[in-house]
Image: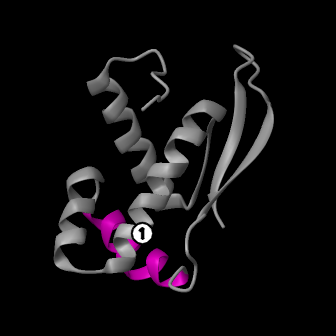
Amino acid sequence: MAYRKLGRDSSARKALFRSILTSFFKHERIETTEAKAKEISGMADEMITLAKKGDLHSRRQALSFLLDEEVTKKLFDVIAPKYSERQGGYTRILKLGPRRGDAADMAILELV
């Protein structure tokens, strides 16, 4: 499987994804680079699918990845029920222009 390394080793990359995903579910939209947004999008969809199951095992799996217990509670009690009829594609990536400092392509990742 190919994935984006984002200039980090595996542990730093996992920590980055955990923190971005936690912030994403907390605020329901996030502005980040396009590469990170594309990588996080699939993970967010997996977490929502997990939350739709709603059982204890899936809740513990989500807790083991997300950094904040309140965010996990929100994911299961608020976000997942919104998508009970939807089969997938819970996130949307809106491309912004390049970032001013280093011209990195920016994007907004949000829940549909």
* Residue nearest the viewer, comparing 67 with 17: 17
- Quadrant where the N terminus lies? top left
47 relative position to 62: left or right: right
In the picture shown, does residue 32 fall above or below 93? above
Percent x, y for residue 20? 45, 43
Disc 1: which residue: 49
Which residues fall within the magenta stretch?
A: 69-82
Percent x, y for residue 108? 68, 46
Q: Residue at x 39, y 73 (%)?
A: 74
Percent x, y for residue 93? 69, 49
- Based on the displayed image, in which of its 4 quarters is residue 47 positioned? bottom left
Residue found at the far right of this picture: 97
Which structural element holds mark 1? helix
* Residue nearest the viewer, comparing 40 with 73: 40
Q: Residue at x 46, y 15 (%)?
A: 7
Mark 1 Cα shell of 10 Å, populated few (<14), some (14-19), many (≥20): some
Asked if residue 73 lies in the magenta stretch, the reply is yes
20 relative position to 32: left or right: left
55 relative position to 22: left or right: left
Mark 1: which amino acid?
Answer: Thr
Asked if residue 102 lies in the magenta stretch, the reply is no
Q: What is the chief secondary structure element of the magenta stretch?
A: helix
